[in-house]
Image (tube, rainbow, N blue to C red):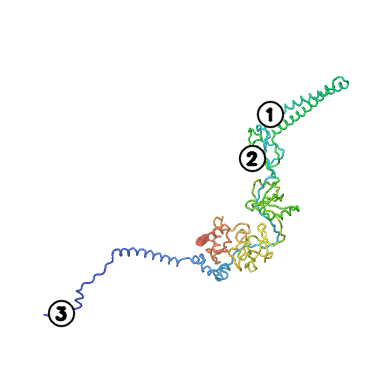
Amino acid sequence: MSSLPPSPESSASTTPATPSPTLHPRRRRQQGKVWPWLLVAAVIAGGVGIWWKTRPANGANGANGGPGAAASAPGGGNAGGRRFAGGGPGGANRTQPVSVEQVRQQNIRVSASAIGTITASNTAIVHAQVSGVLQSIQFKEGQQVKAGQQLAQIDPRAFQAALGQVEGALVRDRASLENARVDLARYRDLAAKDAIPKQQLDTQEALLRQLEGTIKVDQAAVDSARLQLSYARVTAPISGRVGLKQADLGNVVSPSDANGIVTITQNHPIAMVFAVPSALLPQITKKLRANEPMTVEAWDRTGTTRLAIGRVATLDNAIDTTTDTVKLKATFANEDDALFPNQSVGAKLQLDVLANHLAVPSAAVQRGSQGFYVYVVNADNSVATRVVKPGPVDGDWTAVDGKVEAGEKVVIDGVDRLREGAKVEIIASDPQKRAGAATPGGRRSRGVAGAASGAASGAASGAHRASSDGATAGDAQERPRWLDRLPPDVQEKVMKMSPEERQAWIEKRRAERAASGNGTGN
């Protein structure tokens, strides 16, 4: 009986299944570590998406200076005239707040500056002229004294005794002299009658002359003793200010003491020695020969306070070759004692005066590739550069030559971001005089950070106006107008914030204003 071949179905059902390949255990572990990181990444992506959809509108655009800030401003996206005047991303046409000052025609003093040293007109170290015990001190340290005024007293008893001795010798010798004169007269009578030898008369005349010499010696000794006694009374040799005492009561003082008893400096008048370049020597000598007074001003080290005004007294007789300078001495009355010996001060020697010359504030003069220039504000509040040639500087003003005229306004503050043709907004140079800095009654406007009342309301109002005007608080490249309505200390604080901190500050003030119920008024 023949057998039939198996059917495909039966063979398929009876054929064993091929086993599936198994994953390596190490690869399985690696795949298990990847899944948690993918899950974390998905959560972060979802959080970012939620934040992007729910972020504040002005936080995304206005605070960061994006295009939304310009688009939200009324008037078509130029932020009320404070954004880009040309509509482009550049800063040349942006309206910038600046401070200005008018060009003047005034007298400009031509002066030379130097460093001077104050020196006393006279300095005296008061020494004891005799040795002895210091009995009293009759001055106060730092006191002004006059010449001849008693300063101290040395024990005078030893000198009084010496004076008594020489005075006694003088009286004795004077009596001998009188006796010799009487004898001489008697001898002359006897000699005329040839009653005595002439030799005896000659001897008496010689004795008389000898006693006269003794009297002169005794008189000199008396004068010397009196002088030594007077030295026990220490007096001021000059008028001036006494310094600190160098000896105390009870000390034995002597002429050999190096520091003496006290030092006196004559400060009325007082002198100043300073050096100027030798190139100025012709001008100086010309004025000195013509007896023209040359004014010298003494300034403190900071150069902000003028201490005294004096005149040049004399000129040194040689030029210092190491520094190529010549020394001058000026005198000052110094009635208010503003100058002290050995004080270092700034000296300004006036050499000439430019009469009725164009002058601009020194802060207005800038330097660039074209040389020195100033920014002049035109009638349409645009600026133009004018090349000038600066001259002498007198205080805060500089003499200039160039295409500027008296009465024109030049920029003195805010020139760092200006360009040719840029639009500007003129503000007061003094922060206290700017709009919103003070009320007509003289009280400061209400602000934040420590104001006595209405702090949160005023600040929130400023922040609200910043938003309505289109000014971006986060734009660090410009100064929003609403800052001028805040106190100067708050303005400085806000300008130092980062864009994120500033936006958070504005939102906080808005919340405080809303909580106080003040609405959106001024």
Q: Which residue is mark 1?
A: 158
Closest to the camera, between mark 2 and mark 1, is 1
Query: Are there few (<14), some (14-19), or many (20+) residues within 10 Å of tag 2?
Result: few
**Residues at discs 2 and 1 in contact (Cβ within 8 Å):** no
In this view of the protein, which residue sits in the foreground, 304 or 223? 223
The vertical placement of 113 against 384, above or below, is above
- Residue 92 on image: x %, y %: 58, 68
Q: Secondary structure at mark 2?
A: loop
Closest to the camera, between mark 1 and mark 3, is 1
Q: How far apart in space, not on screen, are marks 3 and 2 (Cα)? A: 144 Å
- Residue 183 on image: x %, y %: 83, 22
Query: Are there few (<14), some (14-19), or many (20+) residues within 10 Å of tag 1?
Result: few
**100 displayed left or right of 474:** right
Closest to the camera, between mark 3 and mark 2, is 2
Task: Name the residue type under label 2.
Answer: Leu
Q: Which residue is mark 2?
A: 244
Task: Name the residue type under label 3.
Answer: Leu
Residue extending farthest right: 193
Precedes in sequence: disc 2 or disc 1: 1
Q: Quadrant of the N terminus?
A: bottom left
Q: Which residue is mark 3?
A: 4
Q: Secondary structure at mark 3?
A: loop
Q: How far apart in space, not on screen, are marks 2 and 1 (Cα)? A: 29 Å
- Residue 331 on image: x %, y %: 70, 48
**Residues at discs 1 and 3 in contact (Cβ within 8 Å):** no
Q: Quadrant of the C terminus?
A: bottom right
Query: Are there few (<14), some (14-19), or many (20+) residues within 10 Å of tag 3?
Result: few
Q: Quadrant of residue 104?
A: bottom right
In this view of the protein, which residue sits in the foreground, 210 or 173? 210
Q: Which residue is rendered at x = 49% and y = 65% of the image?
A: 59
Q: Secondary structure at mark 1?
A: helix
Q: Quadrant of residue 378?
A: bottom right
